Amino acid sequence: MHGLLPHEEVVREFRDYCLAESHACRRIYQRKFFYLFTCEYCFSHYVTVIFLVITRYKLLFPDWRGYLIAAFRWCGWQTSI
């Protein structure tokens, strides 16, 4: 899913806007912000982080380390699909 969503026709206008802004903005932080929504690799990590925060999914530790380990595990599972 994470690899397909940035290329779907449903979000095409948003993606085109973000792509144009990632090239046209004057400040680097603005360009990077808009680039995040066009890059499949970056987008997959944001999907992972959002999923982990919403579900409060943790591995091995009940604190921030559990989130970190779960993020590495989830990103590894996404790339194997």
Image (cartoon, grey):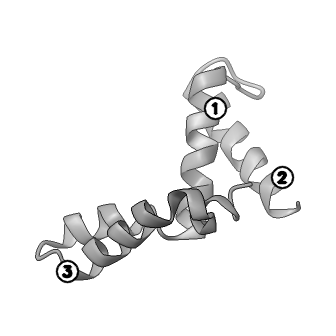
Residue that label 1 marks: 52
Say left or right for 41 vs 77. left
Point out residue 21 in the picture as x, y percentages from the top left corner.
26, 72
Q: Is 68 drawn above or below residue 34 in the view shown?
A: above
Q: Outermost residue toward the left?
A: 26
Foreground residue, 42 or 22?
22
**Could you tell me how far apart the alpha carbons at marks 1 and 3 are, in whole angstroms?**
33 Å
Element type where label 3 sits in the image: helix
Earlier-in-chain disc, 1 versus 2 = 1
How many C-alpha atoms fall within 10 Å of the one at disc 1: few (<14), some, or many (≥20)? some
> For residue 25, which numbered disc appears in the image?
none
Task: Classify 10 Å Cα crowding around label 3: few (below 14), some (14-19), many (20 and above).
Answer: few
Check disc 1 and report its element: helix, strand or loop.
Answer: helix
- The earlier-in-sequence mark between 3 and 2 is 3
- The label number, if any, that marks residue 77 in the structure image: 2
In this rendering, would 77 be left or right of 40? right
Is the residue 25 above or below the residue 73 in the image?
A: below
Q: Earlier in the sequence, mark 1 or mark 3?
A: 3
Q: Give neighbour class at mark 2: few <14, some 14-19, many 20+ (Cα, 10 Å).
A: few
Residue at figure coordinates x 59%, y 54% from the top left: 45
Q: Nearer the viewer, mark 1 or mark 3?
A: 3
- Which quarter shows the N terminus? bottom right
Which residue is the extreme one toward the right?
81
Residue 41 placement (x, y as % from top left): 60, 67
* Kind of residue at disc 3: Ala
**Spatial separation of the CA atoms under disc 3 and disc 2:** 35 Å
Q: Nearer the viewer, residue 21 or 30?
A: 21
Residue under label 3, please give it.
Answer: 24
Q: Quadrant of residue 48?
A: top right
Question: Which residue is located at x 70 percent, y 63 percent?
Answer: 4
